[in-house]
Image (cartoon, rainbow, N blue to C red):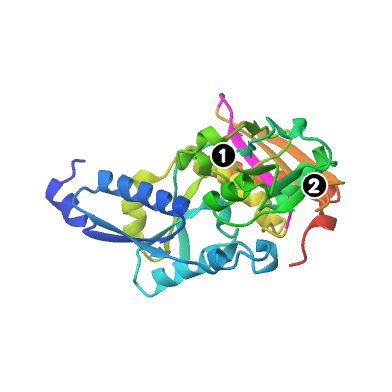
Amino acid sequence: MSVDPSSARADAPQRLVIASRESRLAMWQAEHVQRRLRECHPQCDVQILGMTTEGDRRLDRALAEIGGKGLFTKELELALLDGRADLAVHSLKDVPMEVGAPFALAAVLVREDPRDAFVSTAYASLAEMPAGARVGTSSLRRAAQIRHRHPALEVLPLRGNVVTRLARLDEGRYDAIVLAAAGLKRLGLAERIRAIVEPSVSVPAPGQGALAIETLAARADLARWLAPLADARTTVEVQAERTVSRLLGGSCRVPLAAWCVSTPSGGLKLVARVASEDGRAMAEAKVECEAGDADAALRLGERAARSLLDQGAAQWLAPS
């Protein structure tokens, strides 16, 4: 059935406001969505509302100690509720596993490299670092996995945005730092990556490298307008990852990792880990399926979560 061009134009958005954190990486992400929306809806005036969140302000303590991932989303969600913004752009790994009413994740965009990156001015890889060398990371997940594989290294906390973390490395506070490869690549800083940390050493966080757009669940018009930005493959993969985390109470307080990839035959492969914070003990699940749809992703995540619990992972999960 043909669509009347005039009716299509009448339904198109005229103005949209994106809520975003004001860090350099967050603004890159918001501007990326802004460009995509302008391509899909050329007549639309797309603006960005920059905001500072509680997670950005409180850099003196580890994220796990001050409230977790929701500290990066609460202020943006308030802007959706009071009408200052129509949508919010997040790094999906920063979005709590339960997105409660009245909110919804309306679209997940194609994923950048989900792996961790090793950055150092002195060493080429984690394996080359001598005993006692200092590695900085903001993530319990990374810290536990690094300690598990390289117990002689000193793993230290590191907060702040990407640029701040790199500056602290360059000041000599750390011998190396580990952070998401996606953020470095998006900011044009890929040359700082000395090595990719292979998933055999550090499995990524659920949703790492993916961008998510959050809206009010009642905004069916926004869901329709955002649909061209969604990537079906990434959406399915991160659903499997986030299912593991959701069932195990995953948060920044839990050293939990999950990474799902689509297979050439159209199926899914998922690896998930839970570790003790000191890295001395770890459970790992590797599961796969022949289907590659949303239902299969959900079941795959459930299988991985059960396998981890069967291996005793509950002892390392933070109390709810």
Judge whether residue 257 is colored magenta. yes
Which structural element holds mark 1?
A: helix
Asked whether 122 or 115 is in front, the reply is 122
Q: Which residue is mark 1?
A: 181
Q: Quadrant of the C terminus?
A: bottom right
Q: Which residue is mark 2?
A: 154
Asked whether 255 or 193 is in front, the reply is 193
Q: Provide residue 148's location: percent of width, then percent of height.
A: 82, 42
Q: Provide residue 63's location: percent of width, then percent of height.
A: 65, 62
Q: Quadrant of the N terminus?
A: top left
Earlier-in-chain disc, 1 versus 2:
2
Is residue 305 something that shows in the picture?
Answer: no
- Mark 2 nearby-residue class (10 Å; few <14, some 14–19, many ≥20): some
Judge whether residue 34 is colored magenta. no
- Name the residue: 34% across, 58% down: 222
Q: Amino acid at mark 1?
A: Ala
- Name the residue: 56% across, 39% down: 181
Please give left or right for residue 153 compared with residue 74 in the image.
right
Image height check: is 114 above or below 56? above
The residue segment tinted magenta is: 254-265
Is residue 276 something that shows in the picture?
Answer: yes
**Outermost residue, top side:** 264
Image height check: is 59 above or below 114? below
**Outermost residue, bottom side:** 82
Quadrant position of residue 51: bottom left
Asked whether 97 or 89 is in front, the reply is 89
Q: Provide residue 301's location: percent of width, then percent of height.
A: 66, 46
